Image (spheres, rainbow, N blue to C red):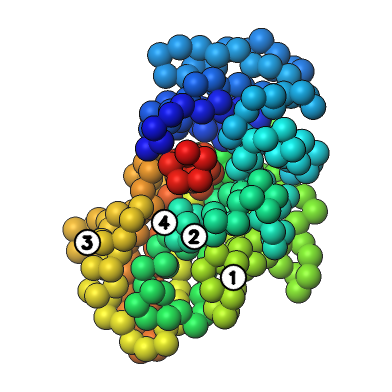
Amino acid sequence: MAARKFNLAVVGATGAVGREMIKTLAERRFPVAELRALASERSLGHLLEFGDREISVDVLGPDSFAGIEIALFSAGGSVSKEYAPIAAKAGAVVVDNTSAFRMDPEVPLVVPEVNPAALADWQKRRIIANPNCSTIQMVVALKPIHDVVPIRRIIVSTYQAVSGAGQRGIHELEQQVRDLFNLREVKRELFPHRIAFNVIPCIPQSNAFGEADQTTEEWKMINETHKILDPAIQVAATCVRVPVFNGHSEAVYVELERPLPAAEARELLRQAPGVAVVDDPPTMVFPTPFDASGEDLTLVGRVRNDPSNPNGLWLFVVADNLRKGAALNAVQIAEVMAAKYLV
């Protein structure tokens, strides 16, 4: 950890990820001198817990970043596009949780357990991109395998919790469940179909489909995996919203350059940073989103070879999308910056 303290700002402080960022900073004892919580006018004066004290929310504006050294952004792509360059020009290093800068060739896209060396390019824009939540947990699980036996192809199906759509997603699932049990009309505001006791193979919830009939979430997993892990890997994804409050799950199939016994793959994963192997099917031990919620580690189980392909390997990968999928990864980036680049 860094030898001195830093002035930080959290943009989007009252959102699901922003709150988790503040909580994570406190839990990991990040060396904070000042923490500035920034949000829209409707949140002005709200109090947020930061460790054993409370901080008041200020309104985000062009002058919000005076004296700020690290700014964590999670307030939506349009906000990041406007204010991240302002924060960077004011002298802050921006860690942005939106998709606004992820594919910018001058902006590092970083998962600290996977490609920390990419942070060396931070000065080009003074902006560092946090990858998509589903991409993060997948590459954390696949990096230790790819380092030993190169991956040729990935096929992944995701089962993504409603918290990935923010507070509104959590509220909509909760309200729909209440309405169903109380025999009331079920209303939809956010998702294109009822999410309670249903699954929706479309993320995000609007303007989702693009080239080749892939959703933007699916393209994120494809393009970000190429940028973070290896551009030579073929990637195919199907992203599905499921009626789970928190924690994303993924069924990941990889085709390797050569056979890798499942037992060997488990051992590689046990030794990998940020990974916990939860895998004993005969005793019904495997990862679930309930297990992952509130955890920092990416959980991996159901590791098994493909009987139809000697080079095929299956994994089931689960993580807390608000923590490792967003807040924790951003704070880990800030920790590396504080310890290595901003000393």
Separation of marks 2 and 1 at Cα, in angstroms: 16 Å
Separation of marks 1 and 3 at Cα, in angstroms: 31 Å
Residue type (three-letter) at the residue carrying disc 1: His
Residue type (three-letter) at the residue carrying disc 2: Ala
Mark earlier in primary sequence (1, 4): 4
Secondary structure category for the residue under label 1: helix
Secondary structure category for the residue under label 3: loop
Mark earlier in primary sequence (2, 1): 2
Mark 3 crowd level (few <14, some 14–19, many ≥20, 10 Å Cα): few
Looking at the rendered structure, which numbered label has been put on residue 280?
A: 3
- Rendered location of residue 163, percent (x, y): 56, 40
Q: Is residue 203 left or right of residue 154?
A: right
Q: Is residue 239 above or below residue 306?
A: above
Separation of marks 3 and 2 at Cα, in angstroms: 34 Å
Separation of marks 2 and 4 at Cα, in angstroms: 10 Å
- Mark 2 or 1, which is nearer the eye? 2
Q: Is residue 175 above or below residue 332?
A: above
Residue at coordinates 45% horizontally, 79% vertically from top-left?
151
Looking at the rendered structure, which numbered label has been put on residue 117?
A: 2
- Mark 4 or 3, which is nearer the eye? 4
- Mark 1 or 3, which is nearer the eye? 1
**Pointer 4: what residue?**
113
Q: Are marks 2 and 1 in contact (CB under 8 Å)?
A: no
Is residue 176 visible to us here?
no
Q: Are marks 4 and 3 in contact (CB under 8 Å)?
A: no
**Pointer 1: what residue?**
226
Looking at the rendered structure, which numbered label has been put on residue 36?
A: none
User: Which residue appears farthest toward the left when viewing the image?
Assistant: 283
